[in-house]
Image: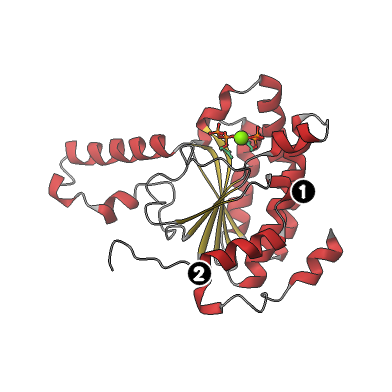
Amino acid sequence: MTAKLTALQHRPADLIAERMPQHVAVIMDGNGRWAKQRGLPRIMGHKRGVDTLKLLLRCCNDWGIGALTAYAFSTENWGRPEEEVEFLMVLFERVLRRELAELMAENVRIRFVGNLAVLPASLQQEIERSMVDTAQNTGVQFTVATNYGGRQEIVQACRAIAHQVKQGNLEPEEVNDALFERHLYTQGLADPDLLIRTSGEMRISNFLLWQLAYAEMYITDTFWPDFDHEEFHRALVNYQQRHRRFGKL
Ligand code: IPE
Ligand code: IPE
Ligand code: MG
């Protein structure tokens, strides 16, 4: 994998620099099916999925995409078998610990969004450490949605705003899009331009419900562990051919 990575560097010639998405969001789906197809336990798919994520981060860095947001664990994923949930929590922690030095070397700024307070304490510590250590980095802004739910995010924003109104610090008329956005987990991050979902499912699954309002969607049948730089390249070419109208003509 290392050889392939060092070979990347340059943006493929058919991608137009001025039309690169500034923020790409990914629903990393299909790890379980990838493993099943090979007669492997589902967790092997999750392990391989980490490599895909690392590769995309590298592509963003090399090709001029400023922000990458990845859906790692949804509020609904707690409903999976206990062993799988446990494995994922341990995997997140292990990967963070193992990759932090490389994230620093690559100048990546990492941030976690979601209800982090209920994650295992040791994982919370690694999350905190990675966010503090990389806070001053100026490269790709890498956001990981962990125990994330779009509805929950909107509800907690409403609750925070309601408190301010109740305390008399805010007038209901002052609640607008800009104010609302400042209460989302993703505050300060521009909305995604492109949403990629792997493994063919044509749904949002409670991801970034507010932020995806005008994102271009790209869905591929490829399972997440098989999504590589060529697939990413293909998605970007497709994106660059779109005509984004934002409701206008
Ligand atoms: C996505 O792959 C990873 C997570 C949701 C954590 P899945 O685990 O959903 O894989 P499939 O959809 O069952 O194949
Ligand atoms: C979405 O995938 C969540 C993540 C990728 C973390 P799921 O596999 O959980 O979504 P559904 O169940 O197919 O909608
Ligand atoms: Mg899935």
x 23%, y 41%: residue:
164
**Where in the figure is residue 229, as x and y percent of width and height?**
71, 61
**How is colour applied across the structure in the image?**
secondary structure
Q: Where, quadrant-wise, is the C terminus in this rendering?
A: bottom left
Q: Secondary structure at mark 1?
A: helix
Q: What kind of residue is marked 2?
A: Gln
Most distant residue in the top direction: 82
Mark seen at residue 98: 1
Between the C-alphas of marks 2 and 1, the distance is 38 Å
**Where in the figure is residue 120, as x and y percent of width and height?**
62, 30
Q: Where, quadrant-wise, is the N terminus in this rendering?
A: bottom right
Residue beneath disc 2: 241
The foreground one among 74 and 21 is 21
Mark seen at residue 238: none
x 59%, y 61%: residue:
235
Quick check: 145 left or right of 129? left
x 46%, y 37%: residue:
206
x 83%, y 30%: residue:
39
In terms of image quarters, where does ligand 3 lie?
top right
The quadrant where residue 128 appears: top right
